[in-house]
Image (spheres, grey):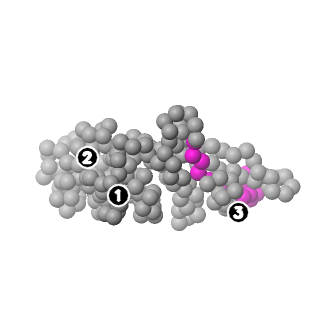
Amino acid sequence: MDAESAFVVDDYPYSYHLLCKIRYWLETSTKGAKKGDVRMVTQTTNPRRPGESWNTPKLGQYSALRFLAQYENGHVDSVPLAVWTTAERWMRFYLSGTWALLNAYERKRVGLVVTLSERGDQVGRARWKVRMDAVRAGGCLPYEEFIALHPELEPFVEADYDLIRDYVQAGGFDLVGRWWADPADSVVDLDAEIPLADGSVPDGD
């Protein structure tokens, strides 16, 4: 995406009493340490100037992956996924509803990031898996009942339990094997570079 293919909202608030246009797009870095990373860019028009005069674009933070989303209330934002995605971050990403809207190629890219992240946090991921297996087996009991049955899992705060319970109830994956892939896909090399949005592969510069 770029400014010319951006998502445009025609009646965005400007100052206190004015309206303007705002456009949103995702920009992929092509060089340097952030090569391949994605950030959101926003740009508004200036209704105080004649014609359609665009202000300087505002640049967001880079992340390994980022998806543009419009919510039911009309708000537009981007949903990021960091190159080192913890189990907690993955569950929050899944519960945001973004996964359900992705196509097969986008799901594969997300799956590669999450799987590569797991290699760097095997202890933490294993701890979350033990808890998740217990929540699944317990039928998503109320927190107090669950802890009474599983004192060996403490410390396990209620907020973490609620996150896992919501993830399990939403049909979240176990993150075992190539959980993201279509069975008809070819074998994916997890040691290969993660492809860029246009399908190309970073050259490692």
Looking at the picture, tell me which residue is in the foreground, 137 or 203: 203
Mark 3 neighbour class, 10 Å CA radius: few under 14, some 14 to 19, many 20 or more:
few
Q: State the residue position of label 1.
A: 186
Residue 113 shown left or right of residue 29 in the figure: left
What residue lies at 14% left-to-right and 44% top-to-bottom? 152
Q: Tell me if residue 8 comes above or below residue 129 in the rendering.
A: below
Q: Quadrant of residue 70?
A: bottom right
Q: Amino acid at mark 3?
A: Asp
Q: Tell me if residue 138 comes above or below residue 32 in the rendering.
A: below
Residue 156 shown left or right of residue 74 in the figure: left
**In the drawing, what numbered circle is on residue 128?**
2
What residue lies at 54% left-to-right and 46% top-to-bottom? 38
Q: Quadrant of residue 135?
A: bottom left
Instruction: Measuring from the top left, give residue 40's x and y in whole percent.
Output: 58, 48
What residue lies at 69% left-to-right and 56% top-to-bottom? 4
User: What segment carries the magenta color?
Assistant: 14-29
Q: State the residue position of label 3.
A: 10
Q: Quadrant of residue 97?
A: bottom left
Residue 19 painted magenta: yes
Mark 2 neighbour class, 10 Å CA radius: few under 14, some 14 to 19, many 20 or more:
some
Looking at the picture, tell me which residue is in the foreground, 93 or 121: 121
* Pointer 1 or 2: first along the chain: 2
Is the stretch drawn in magenta largely helix, strand or loop?
strand
Is residue 86 something one can see in this rendering? no
